[in-house]
Amino acid sequence: MIKKLKSKVKRLKDFVLKGERVFDNFNNASIQVVLKNQYKIMKAISPSCLPQLSEVGFSAYSQFEEDGILLYIFSIIGEGRKRVVEICAGSGMECMATNLIINHGWEGLLFDGSEDNVRIGQEFFSKNKATFLHPTRFCQNWITSENINELIRSNGFSGEVDLLSLDIDGNDYWILKAIEVISPRVIICETNNVIPSELALTIPYDAEFNYLNSPKEKKDFVGVSLLAMEKLCKSKGYRLIGAHKYGFNVIFMKNSKGEEYFPEVSIETIHNNPYTIEARKNRWPAVKDLGWEKV
């Protein structure tokens, strides 16, 4: 029985992978619903049946394979209130929240600093057949540690949410540190894996920082190291549970949630991939002596 279930899940996953961005939204959603229910069946039989995070990834709207990873996580721990907040969502056509919103009926609150991105995103959700009756909230704001809590609160989100996605390429550490108005069950955020695993570093806080304005030789002077983000998340009651295959989009889960299924993993495990190893070797020397702040 267990072998048959694993084989069936693999076939379904392969079907999704081959069809990504080709199926219309109805078919894509229906395939994912079947996949989600297969995970629930496997969980009910035995946790030993369940695949690893490295085996469940696929992209529907995410840049990499995070859509599949998030689908798997929430199939196992439950979807809760089905609410997601994403900070720096781009146009919304390629981000962490969109698959959950369009294909699984989640309520979203998305932010981006670009007027053009937000206009495109608002049009995208207003014309999509899954969201046109109640388009997701998509707000144009320049996010700072001073305004983030009020922006979230004033748009109707507070208390427990299921997912917080954070990818600013800048003040990520300081924004996450400031957030108090919501309590996410899961956090997915980008870290700078050019920085060695043993260093807890971030860029100094600058409310006006924009990586697009950085000179070429300082393009890697952005964001926060994984160790720094892990320390911050631990102080907030979260553990590191995994990442995508390149090791910079990482996932934290609240300690009271899903511990049987998603144990804590080490930074070394996350960074043990060819992309990170090569990036650190070739790119860290150029920025290691810049003005990083230890945390």
Image: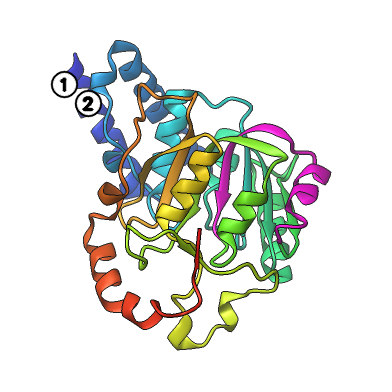
Q: Amino acid at mark 2?
A: Lys
Residue at image point 61% right, 50% down: 177
**In front: 199, or 107?**
199
Residue 145 lies within the magenta run: yes
Left or right? Give the position of 19 relative to 214. left
Q: Residue furthest right?
A: 154
Circle 1: is it few (<14), some (14-19), or many (20+) Cα within 10 Å? few
Residue 287 visible? The answer is yes
Q: Do the CB atoms of the residues marked 2 and 1 lie less than 8 Å apart? A: yes
**In front: 38, or 285?**
285
Left or right? Give the position of 282 relative to 24. left
Alpha-carbon span between mark 2 and mark 1: 5 Å
Secondary structure at numbered mark 2: helix
Secondary structure at numbered mark 1: helix
* Residue 86 at x, y percent in the picture: 61, 50
Left or right? Give the position of 169 relative to 36. right
Residue at image point 66% right, 56% down: 124
Q: Which residues are magenta?
A: 144-167
* Residue 194 at x, y percent in the picture: 35, 68
- The residue singled out by tag 1 in the image is 3
Q: Quadrant of residue 64?
A: bottom left
Residue at image point 36% right, 30% down: 262
Q: Residue furthest left?
A: 3
Q: Residue furthest front?
A: 294
Circle 2: is it few (<14), some (14-19), or many (20+) Cα within 10 Å? some
Q: Amino acid at mark 1?
A: Lys
* Image: 236 above or below 269: above
* Image: 44 above or below 73: above
Left or right? Give the position of 216 relative to 198. right
Residue 206 lies within the magenta run: no
- The residue singled out by tag 2 in the image is 6
